[in-house]
Each structure stands twice: as C-alpha cells, then as structure tokens.
Image (cartoon, rainbow, N blue to C red):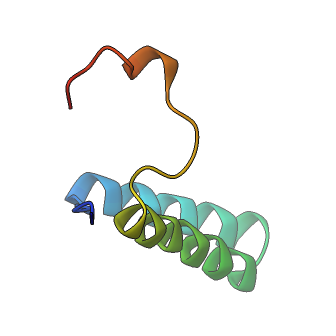
Amino acid sequence: MALKIYWTDFSKGELRLIFDYYNKKASLKIARKLVHELTQEGIKLHNQPYAGPKEELLIDRNI
C-alpha cells in the first residue's frame, strides 16, 4: 500500500530554509546532500508507510 506524500508550499519553504542554512554554514555540497536525503525519506515513506516504530502518542488515532 503506497502512502500519498504532499510537499506543501510550507514544507517546500522549510526545505529551502534548511538548504540555505547549510549552504551558508557548511557548503553547497553538504546542503545538496542533506536536501536529497530528506526527499529520499519521503520516497521511502511513500513506498513503505508502516516502516519504523509506532508513535506512542498516535496509537489511539484511527488514521
């Protein structure tokens, strides 16, 4: 079962802020690598929505 992942304008903006921060504080290479890894996690979640531990605070929710 695939999970639909939405990259909202807010999440894209936050990703841009992360990129800009690491580009300034570290390097362009590190900023690109970090953003790439973050977007890859979204792809993993899309393909395997039940991977990882259950969140204790969300166990009682239906969705």
Q: Nearer the viewer, residue 45 or 27?
A: 45
Question: Can you give x and y, in whole percent of width and height, for residue 48 in the image?
Answer: 43, 62
Q: Quadrant of the N terminus?
A: bottom left
Q: Is residue 61 above or below residue 24?
A: above
Splitting the image into 4 quarters, where does residue 45 fall? Answer: bottom left
User: Residue visible at 44% across and 15% down?
Assistant: 57
Question: Can you give x and y, in whole percent of width and height, for residue 3 in the image?
Answer: 26, 60
Question: Can you give x and y, in whole percent of width and height, for residue 52 in the image?
Answer: 57, 46
- Which residue ends up furthest to the front in the rendered image? 1
Left or right: 54 with respect to 34? left
Left or right: 33 with respect to 50? right
Q: Is residue 34 above or below residue 9?
A: below
Question: Can you give x and y, in whole percent of width and height, for residue 23 in the image?
Answer: 66, 73
Splitting the image into 4 quarters, where does residue 15 fall? Answer: bottom left
- Which residue ends up furthest to the bottom in the rendered image? 29
Q: Quadrant of the C terminus?
A: top left
